[in-house]
Image: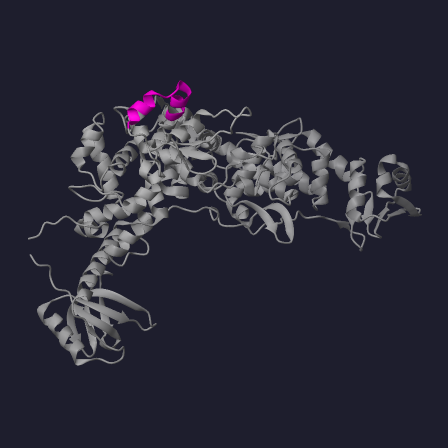
Amino acid sequence: MSTEPPATLAAWLRTRSDEQLRALLVARPDVARPAPSDVVALASRLAVPVSVDRALDELDAATLQVLDVVLLAPTDGMAPDALVAALPEVPDDVLTGAVGTLTTRALLWGDDVLHAPDPVRRAVRHPAGLGRRALDLRVQLPADLPAALAELAPDERAVLERLAGDRPVGHLPDAPANGAATPARRLLQRGLLARIDALNVELPREIGVLLRGGSPYGPPRRRPEPAVVTRDPQVADRRAAGAALETVGRIGELLALLEEEPAGLLRSGGVGVRDQKRLAKALHVPEPEAAWLLELAFASGLLDVGGPHRDEWLPTRGYDVWREQDLADRWAVLAAGWLDGVRLPSLVGVRDLAGKAANALSPDLVRHTAPAIRRSALAVLAERPPGSGLAPEDLTALLRWRTPRRADRLAPVPDMLAEAARLGVLVSGVLSAAGRGLLAAGEDGAADGMRGLLPEPVDHVLAQPDLSLIAPGPLVAELADTLAVVADVESSGGATVFRVSESSVRRALDAGWSATDLHDFFAKASRTPVPQALDYLVDDVARQHGRLRVGAIESYVRSDDHGLLSQVLNDRRTAAAELRRLAPGVLVSGLGADEVLTVLREAGYAPAGENPGGAVLTRPPARPRAAGRRPGSESHPAPRALSADDLDATVREIRAGDAALAARRGEAVRQVPGVTTASTLELLSRAVREGVPVWLGYVDAQGSGSQRVVQPVSLAGGFLSGYDERRGENRTFAVHRITSIALVEPDAG
């Protein structure tokens, strides 16, 4: 029996067990869908540059160093024993684990000799930080290279030693004004540097190895051992719940403000600074906090642009659903939106090269790598037991070791951790229970982790003598809606303080409430007696409300109190309303009714709108909505992990396709669809009789062709019944739809 080693990646994959193929598909899920037709197709997908880059990006520094050694071998392939000699300071278990990781992902293949596929060689441009060989760079090195290096001036040797570090490519400096040659240009003339283009040079590999001395592959890349942060898990979860409660409340306030007065959409996208300042002032938060809340609401699908004919930022229809959910579910929507969001809120206000600052919700904040970075950071913390975590700088250092090829993308990690702390996903470097649930099971897991930690919504307030209303917890949606009309938020937190004022009472009267309605509401909503001062305020404002009536001429102002009209007409503060007397009880204006109402209210009067029939015109609050989008629709999600059943089915399809490929190499009977030949029936009958699998070319009722391996069971009435190896199920095939057939002979033992 031949024991020739496999000559290609496909041949080596064919020797792997089903368990090893499943491990490959788990490690590189992007090659598994749709299922490869056979091993050759699998090998082709493994060679796709995007797939290779993704697989390399997931390797830690120690594993990449082992790969570098194989890539730098003078011949194609390296025995595993040679790795031990090349990296004597690396522990055996680290070497063994690295080789296992690389072969599992098919970034190296072979058993007795390890080979690197060509796509991997192309993807790793400078293995171990060394340049290309002098031959590849078309450089003629000095015959006695050590002697040539020994003769170098200190500034020249410094250039070479710098390039012999982690990056062998450098920028060629401009020649000085006096015409003297720079060290780099002198090295070029001596053949010790290679010119890549007009601006850049590269250090030949042979020189880099010589300068590194006894460590040509660099020092061993050891895993950092960060200091561990510990917290009481229960305390951490309670603090996380506090942060979650505050965030949910802030988002609700923000969207209520935008419901009342939407923010304008800038021509370049995003929210203008003026709107951001307005929202920050109304929410009593700093402007960066307002920007963060805008970004969070957008990432969660609760805020979006109104549409092509409404260029403003509005709550979405999803907001109406969200506000009816319980607190844990509302928080989970926000946390999941943050985790999968492709935007970096921390970039708001950061200036670009042209000096322009990025606005909140601007397209300039999009970074498609953001979800992967957030997940990788949280995954490191999730590996530690509850109550154990890492400081931001230690976590960043560990991530740099784990994914060195992504190190340049890790700058936002500290800001991401700060955002996670604001949300309650993270508390002082420790992942909360809800944060663990978010990472493991998404929105549902986050809600389950937070449920029980947040207070139940309350349906009452506590009226105070100073005309404030204290909500001792989050409010039920109906009560919150009503309070948004009749009072203003003065402060928020664990207990929200609302303030009833003349303007808020007037706002309620404008919306159609009567004084009686307001008295009844405060009496029912408050668990404490309604203060007399609040009753007096409602009655006083209601008594003044509507004494002036505004209609359209463009508009008019009328009142039975002629003295009041004279006062309004002569008031300097109402000059902007452009009023003039039409009759003893009527003033008119060329401005619209809404504009006149605004001017009179700002001047301290209490006018009411009037319809054509003379009745007071109430203004029920409108609720404009943006259609919105599905949260996370902007992101580019990583390939979905396959279930155990999916893995088994995919491996089965690959094996069946391989068997079909072997069968096609032998004699195959071919026929025209719709015409059954005697040869086909004879071959099928033999397969049923002897229990031999057959490879079928088949055209279904929709005209789609496919190939499959079938274990036949019976042949009767023009139909073949058997077990479809690729799909793992019993099927029936019409014989007249078979286009070709061949027996799959068993392997020779």
Q: In this view, does 733 lie to the left or right of 510?
A: left
Say if residue 243 shows up in the picture: yes
In-front residue for pair 192/159: 192
Which quadrant holds residue 232? top left
Say if residue 452 shows up in the picture: no
Residue at horizontal 25%, vertical 56%? 40
Which quadrant holds residue 575? top right
Residue 265, percent from left and from top: 63, 44
Residue 201, percent from left and from top: 42, 33
Residue at horizontal 27%, vertical 59%? 37
Give the residues in magenta: 144-160
Indicate the quadrant containing the C terminus: top left, top right, bottom left or bottom right: bottom left
Q: Is residue 352 left or right of residue 96?
A: right
Residue 513, percent from left and from top: 69, 44
On whether residue 157 falls in the magenta region, the answer is: yes
In-front residue for pair 340/412: 412
**Vertical comparison of 1 with 276: above or below:** below
**Vertical comparison of 566 with 640: above or below:** above
What is the total number of numbered labels drawn onto the structure image?
A: 0
